[in-house]
Amino acid sequence: MRLLRLASLWAGMVLGAPAFAADRPVMHFATEEWPPFFSNALPGNGLTGALLEAVLGQMGYGLKIDYFPWKRAMEVGLHDPRYVGVVAMFRTPEREALCHFSDPVGSRQTIVAFLADKPVAAATLNELHGIRLGTVSGYSYGEQFDGMVRSGQLKVEAGVNDEANLRKLLHLRFSAIVIEKRMLSYLLASGRYTPAERHRIAIADHLFSERAVHVCFQHTAEGLQLQQAFSKAARGVDLARIERDYWRGIGETGLPLARP
């Protein structure tokens, strides 16, 4: 029922957008299944897919997204000539040489999740020292956190994706995991977890600042032109309204998350 309601909402968004010829050119991107932000199972390919489609529509383009594991998405999206880039990425100094970053297309809130009966009490990232943390291979969690991992101040184990890490947390393989807040809520509301498992999860959402995400266009002359055109078009789209409507359509993000 929730997806049906969202499909109707998304159809209204599409019908309200400028009309273009059916054979308009298509921009082809790579990413990872990451609901509710990106998913082939959600209308508009998820929230960020909906934002991209709205901007590309202003440019006279359609949108095509192919899904891969994150490392593979980075490889094909940034180097395969069939693609124009990767969506959506955090902007970091290390990534500046990889691609041309667009203006922001939404934001993400990173949190630490742990078991309610085994709370992780940390006022700062420094206080996570000595705690076994689950992360995802290839993800950036912000300059401070990433730097602390590189220097050995924080102990992490990189997994294949967020859901695998959540399962490991529930099976006591991790003391805590680092994950996006709405992603965690959406996973827990997916029906793949029992009520008892959902109630075991608690979070700390004060350790990371909210960060903007961007389209990462290939580091080529054509990629630079597309990035400039995309950023210009994005300024003419009410992305905040689309985001509000999308969250409303999926009932915000599913479940409230407990804090110790």
Image (spheres, rainbow, N blue to C red):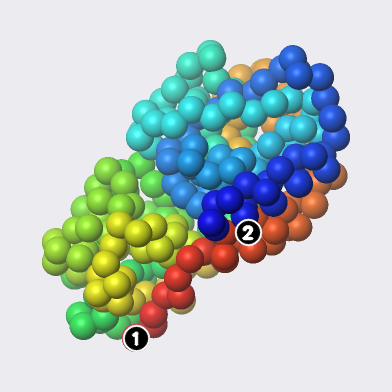
- Identity of the residue drawn at 30% across and 53% down: 163
Foreground: 143 or 260? 260
Position of the C terminus, as image quadrant, is bottom left
Residue 179 visible in image: no
First in sequence, mark 2 or 1: give its number: 2
Q: Position of residue 130 (x, y in %)?
A: 19, 70
Residue placed under numbered mark 2 in the picture: 249
Q: Can you tell which of label 2 and label 1 is closer to the viewer? A: 2
Left or right of 105, for residue 157: left
* Image-quadrant location for residue 194: bottom left
Residue on which disc 1 sits: 260
Q: What residue type is labelled 1?
A: Pro
| Mark 1, secondary structure of its residue | loop
**Residue appearing at x 21%, y 83% in the figure:** 117
Residue depicted at 81% across the width and 19% down the height: 21
Q: Is residue 23 above or below residue 57?
A: above
Examine the rendering and report whether any part of residue 28 can be seen. yes
Q: Classify mark 1: residues with Cα within 10 Å, few (<14), some (14-19) or many (20+).
A: some
Report crowding for label 2: few under 14, some 14 to 19, many 20 or more residues within 10 A (C-alpha): some
Whole-percent x and y of residue 201? 30, 73
Residue sitting farthest toward the bottom:
260
Q: Residue furthest front?
A: 1
Q: Quadrant of residue 87?
A: top right
Between marks 2 and 1, how big is the CA–CA gap?
A: 29 Å
* Frontmost residue, 64 versus 84: 64
Image mark for residue 175: none
Going by the numbered disc 2, the residue's amino acid type is Gly
Circles 2 and 1: CB atoms closer than 8 Å: no
Q: Left or right: 28 with respect to 111?
A: right
